[in-house]
Amino acid sequence: MSQSYQNSPLPRQPVQSSFHWLYAFWKFSRPHTIIGTSLSVLALYLIAIAISNPTLSPLPFDYTHGKPTPDSHSTRLTASLLPLLGAWIACLCGNVYIVGLNQLEDVDIDKINKPHLPLASGEFSRQTGQFIVALTGILALVVAWLTGPFLLGMVAISLAIGTAYSLPPIRLKQFPFWAALCIFSVRGTIVNLGLYLHYSWALKQSQVIPPVVWVLTLFILVFTFAIAIFKDIPDMEGDRLYNISTFTIQLGSQAVFNLALWVITVCYLGIILVGVLHIASVNPIFLVIAHLALLVWMWLRSLAVDLQDKSAIAQFYQFIWKLFFLEYLIFPIACFLA
C-alpha cells in the first residue's frame, strides 16, 4: 500500500503555512472524534463530582451574592482539576494516535472514500503522518502514567485495540464483527468505566461503579455499535474495491441504515425506561423528556435521507455523532438535577 501511495499523483500540494498545517492537523485528528472524546472526559468528571457531593458546584467556586467564595468543597474541586487535565491530554493524544494510524494504513482507500483527509490529499507526507502518530502515542502513555494508574490502564488498552484495528497482520477492521467490536468496546466500555475509576481514585472515592455510570456505559456501548455500522455506508465504494468486508457490503446500505436507526431507538427507549423506573440517581423527568425529544428528532431527520446521495448520508452520520455528543451533556445535568 505504501508503494501505491508513493507512485500515485497527489491532488493537492503540501501545506505551505502554519495556519494551513494546523488546519490539516485538525482534519487529520478527525474533529468529530475529538469532540466526542473531550465531552466524555468532561462528562465522567462531572458525574464523579455529582456523585461525590451532589451539593457541590461543578465550578471551582461557589457563588454567594454574586461573588466567588472559596470553601472546602471548592478547594477539593480545584485539586481535582489536574487529573481532569491529564485525562483530557492523554485521551486526545490517544485519539489522534488511533485515527492517525488508521489513515496511514488506508491512504489508497481514503483517496476514494475521504479524499479531503491530509494524507489522501497530499497535504501531509507519509513521514509527517508517521511522526504525528508516534509522538501522540508516546505522549498518551507518558501523560497517563504521570496522572494515575486507572488512566494508564484505560489508555494502554485503548491504544492496543486501536493498533489491532488498523495495523497488519491483525487488521481487525477487515472483519465486520471485530471491527464493530473494537469501536464500541473502546468508546462504550473502556473509556467510560476507565475514566470514572480514574476520577473516583483522584477524588478518593469508593471504586464501586454506581448505577448511573453503568447505565451511561451500556447506552454508549449500544449507541456506538450503531455508529460503527453506519460509518461504512458512505465508504462502500472504496471498501469494496480494496476487499474490506463491512456490514454495508454484506447486507446493503438500506438494511444497515434501518438497523442503525432501530439500535439507537432501543437506546433511547431503554433510557426512558430507566427514568420511569428510577433505576439510577438522575432526574427522571429531565431524562425522559430529553430522550423523547431526541428520538422524535432522529426519526424526522431520517425520513429526508436519500441513500443514493453520498453527501446526505455523510450529513446524517454527522447528525448521529451530534446525538452521541448530547448524551455526555444530558447525563451530567441529570445527575446534578437529581
Image: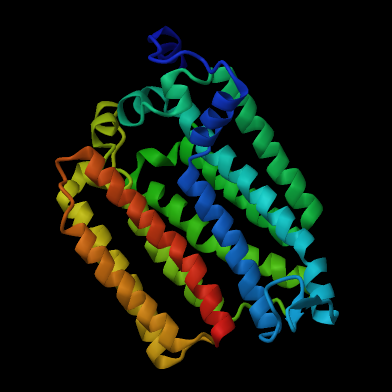
Q: Is residue 46 left or right of residue 237?
A: right
Up the image or down, 52 lies above or below 297; here it is below
| Residue 58 picture location, percent across and down | 67, 74
Q: How many marks?
A: 0
In the image, what residue occupies the spot 36% across and 31% down? Answer: 114
In the image, what residue occupies the spot 29% across and 37% down? Answer: 235
Up the image or down, 21 lies above or below 233; here it is above
Asked if residue 110 shows in the view, the reply is yes
Q: Residue furthest bottom?
A: 277
| Residue 239 picture location, percent across and down | 29, 33
In the image, what residue occupies the spot 39% across and 55% down? Answer: 321
Question: In which quadrant of the rendered image does the C terminus lie?
Answer: bottom right
Identify which residue, 138 or 296, lies in the foreground.
296
In the image, what residue occupies the spot 56% across and 81% down? Answer: 335
| Residue 204 picture location, percent across and down | 79, 75
**On the image, which quarter does residue 302 sit in?**
bottom left
Q: Is residue 269 left or right of residue 310?
A: right
Identify which residue, 125 or 325, lies in the foreground.
325
